[in-house]
Image (spheres, rainbow, N blue to C red):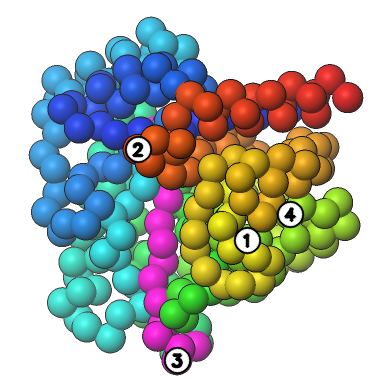
Amino acid sequence: MKHLQIGAHVSSSGGLWKAVERAVAIEAEAIQIFPSAPQSWRPTNHTPEAYQRFREAHAAASLGEVWAHCIYLVNLATESEEQLDKSIAAVVNALTVAERAGARGVVLHTGSHKGAGLDSALAQIAGAVERIFEGAPGETVLALENAAGHGGTIGRDFLELGTVLRAVSNPRLQVCVDTCHAFAGGYNLADKGGVQAMLEEFETEVGLHNLAVWHLNDSKMGLGDQRDRHENIGEGRIGTEGFRVWLDAIRRVPEIPANAMLLEVPGFDKDGPDLENVRRMQAIRAEVEGA
């Protein structure tokens, strides 16, 4: 059975390589960064020296996978042509940064159809993704993240994500599953039967071979509440026992290629993923692997 990497989203403020230092400080085994400021359209112009220092620091620290998270302003389902063009450019930039940093891929919130339904925006989304891959050639993966479902966000269920993947039909387009979003979207990850049902649905609608990475978050909100509210590991509605059930189930499925589990929790000091959250998840993993 696979040994999954427990990683975290960390800041790259002050230089890409600083992210590695911050990951090491909290004992993270894999890393996620923003390629540029998450609430700005303006891309960060990283220098060749910055990429080199990041790669060298990453190798020296013996960290696992690297992922980038695209900015939050992107909406590939927007009715605004200007926002669509900006969105495409932002994702191209993120994939370019990821490629140069040696990252496995980029996680993306696809956007919102504002209640109009996926069918109303599917052709536009597929065309946008094709333009993105043309603008950012290479092997870096673009992983569409599942959504909690509030506000017409795309990807509350795996049928929607699978529909987008089928419309594009490119192996570089894959999926990121966020545990908080899945739970809030109605998938009971805290129950063995619920996890099994989720995996069966994912296989049917998306294909387990397209599950590229996990976002690891407890949920402040209840099952099916459709609200995206991350909580520290063991402090939310999934809970320590829920994560134990979920982790034991997924590590027994060899068809899932995802190795990195990236924490995006608020942190006990409200400053993002921290040592306590990493160690809590490492302890759960140790119990599961020792069982």
Is tag 3's residue or tag 4's residue first in the polypeptide sequence? 3
Labels 2 & 3 near each other (Cβ < 8 A) = no
Q: Which residue is mark 4?
A: 189
Q: Residues within 10 Å of mark 4 (few under 14, many from 20)?
A: many
How far is the residue under mark 1 from the one under mark 2?
A: 24 Å
As for residue 113 lying within the magenta part, the answer is: yes
Q: Does residue 47 appear in the picture of this structure?
A: yes
**Which image quarter: residue 248?**
top right
Q: Which residue is mark 2?
A: 271
Q: Main secondary structure of the magenta part?
A: loop
Residue shown at 45% from the left, 91% from the top: 116
Labels 4 & 1 near each other (Cβ < 8 A) = yes
How far is the residue under mark 3 from the one under mark 1?
A: 22 Å
Q: Amino acid at mark 1?
A: Ala
Residue 3 higher or lower than 250, as above or below: above
- Residue 175 x/y as whole percent: 55, 55
**Which image quarter: residue 112?**
bottom left
Residue 250 higher or lower than 10, as above or below: below
How far is the residue under mark 4 from the one under mark 1?
A: 8 Å
Q: Residues within 10 Å of mark 3 (few under 14, many from 20)?
A: few
Of the pair 109 and 39, the residue shown nearer to us: 39
As for residue 155 lying within the magenta part, the answer is: no
**Secondary structure type for disc 3:** loop
Mark 1 vs mark 2: give the one in front: 2
Is tag 2's residue or tag 3's residue first in the polypeptide sequence? 3
**Magenta segment boundaries in residue numbering:** 103-117
Q: Which residue is mark 3?
A: 116
Mark 2 vs mark 4: give the one in front: 2
Q: Does residue 200 appear in the picture of this structure?
A: no
Residue 182 is marked as 1
